[in-house]
Amino acid sequence: MRISLNKYKIFSNAKINIGLNVFQKEDDGYHNIDSIMAPIDLSDEMDITFYSELGDLKIECSDKNIPTDERNILYKTYKIFFEESKKEKEKISIFLKKNIPSEAGLGGGSSNAGFFLKLLNKYYGNIYNEKELEELAMKIGSDVPFFIKNKTARVSGKGNKIELIENNLKDSIILIKPINFGVSTKEAYESFDNLKEVKYADFDKIIENLREGNRIALENNIENSLEQGILETNIDIKMLKMTLNSVISGKKFFMSGSGSTYYSFVTEFEKSQIETRLKTFVDNVKIIICNTIN
């Protein structure tokens, strides 16, 4: 029997949170959130092969710390797509080259899932429209629906409410990811739940700042509820934030999502100077310069 192969290479990009408000835990055990998410041009690569025969999903990954069995979100995506579409499972293989750090607050796993889900839908004849695909993505993970649209958006509720917004910010972004530790989503939310007081971002102002491309005003309005909790309980994160503030005086650094990545907005003029200072004075971090995708 001759097997027909269809091969695709797709790039699934990361995101940053430009502010994140987390609210009190609901009766279902989950939190409502309010955030601006912006896609950035740091991407994982996925080589995906469809074998046109019945079978299962096989995952290989360049990062040996990433599980390649049922624990991987790509497997969950595969399982949910075939269950919901009532199609028989077909043999698919994925080689995942990781460029987006894990436990970083950059949405790497959710992005992999979102882009794989979009490819599955396209490959099998666009079974779902965009809205239906977002609803399906919600069953995979709360950040996955954002990557269906993959444009700067205000994301609220449990991640299911997505409102596109205008982003005219021209600055680059410098990411600072600690090498020796990360922050799990579970740890971040547990730390938040123990906070006695939370300072919230004003997203109406942030949306106006992004529309106007006003970085200075924007930086004064960003808050991250999860960071506030993590700084109370995680000494590594606390020391990193203190180091960043002392090494680059006058710059503001913001945590993306649940961390452990910090980022700062930089102009073309500032970019190389700040990168050099960070590499010289901050140990055990990975520095990545990128831009938002508008």
Image (spheres, rainbow, N blue to C red):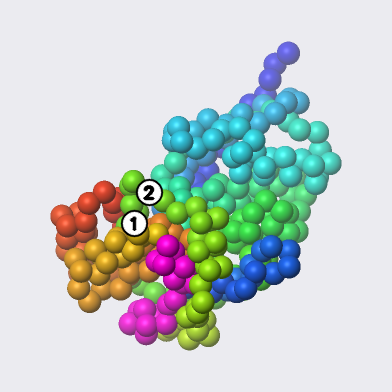
Q: Is residue 189 visible?
A: yes
User: Going from the N terminus, do you reach mark 1 or mark 2 first?
Assistant: 2
Residue furthest top as drawn: 1
Q: Residue at x 69, y 62 (%)?
A: 29
Is 179 one of the magenta-colored residues? Answer: no
Tell me where residue 131 appears, x and y as whole percent. Answer: 73, 62
Magenta residues, as a range?
213-233
* Label at residue 236: 1
Q: Residue at x 69, y 57 (%)?
A: 138
With 204 as the anchor, is 268 left or right in this view?
Answer: left
Asked whether the beta carbons under mark 1 and mark 2 sit within 8 Å of each other, the answer is yes
Residue furthest right as drawn: 86
Of marks 1 and 2, the one in the foreground:
1
Type of amino acid at the residue the image marks with label 2: Phe
Tell me where residue 213 appears, x and y as whole percent. Answer: 39, 80
* Label at residue 207: none
Tell me where residue 290 appears, x and y as whole percent. Answer: 35, 58
201 shown above or below 248: below
Q: Is residue 267 visible?
A: no
Considering the numbered disc 1 on the image, is that residue within a helix, a strand or a loop?
A: helix
Instruction: Identify the residue under disc 2.
Output: 181
> How many labels sit on residues?
2
Label 2: few (<14), some (14–19) or many (≥20) C-alpha neighbours in 10 Å: some
Label 1: few (<14), some (14–19) or many (≥20) C-alpha neighbours in 10 Å: some
